Amino acid sequence: MKKSENFKSRTPHPTLLTGDEVAKILKVSKSFAYLLMKKGEIPVVRIGRSVRVNLEALNTFIENKTF
């Protein structure tokens, strides 16, 4: 087994979502999803100028959110 193959199998990559995907999952407008991210209610990952949301972090947000 190559070293890179061994590394890939042991290190799962997180699923990163765009703001549009977050909005669809939450069934809210894009602007509201981006507002939640800007306010820090949904933690984000910045990659250059791009903003992404870890799927696990979004699931945690959903589980902890009380209405």
Image (tube, grey):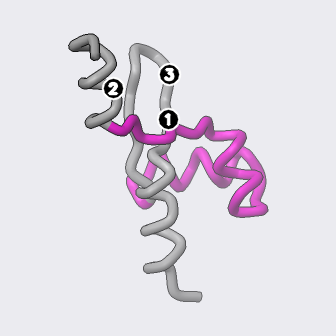
Determine contact: label 3, label 1, CB under 8 Å.
yes
Q: Amino acid at mark 3?
A: Ser
Comparing 7 with 55, the one in front is: 7
Disc with the residue nearer the chain's start (1 vs 2): 2
**Residue of label 2:** 8
Check disc 2 and report its element: helix, strand or loop: helix
Give the CA separation, mark 3 to mark 2.
Answer: 24 Å
Queried whether the magenta region covers residue 67, the answer comes back as: no
Task: Tell me: 44 left or right of 30.
Answer: left
Give the CA separation, mark 3 to mark 1.
Answer: 7 Å
Q: Amino acid at mark 1?
A: Arg
Quadrant the C terminus occupies: bottom right
Give the CA separation, mark 1 to mark 2.
Answer: 21 Å
Residue 53 image position (x, y, % from top left): 48, 43
Tell how many labels.
Answer: 3
Q: Which residues are magenta?
A: 12-41
**Residue of label 1:** 52
**Residue of label 3:** 50
Comparing 34 with 21, the one in front is: 21
Q: Which residue appears at 61% of the width and 36% of the height? A: 18
Crowd band around label 2 with a 10 angstrom C-alpha radius: few (<14), some (14–19), many (20+): few
Determine contact: label 3, label 2, CB under 8 Å.
no
Residue 3 image position (x, y, % from top left): 21, 13
Task: Tell me: 12 left or right of 17.
Answer: left
Residue 4 image position (x, y, % from top left): 28, 13
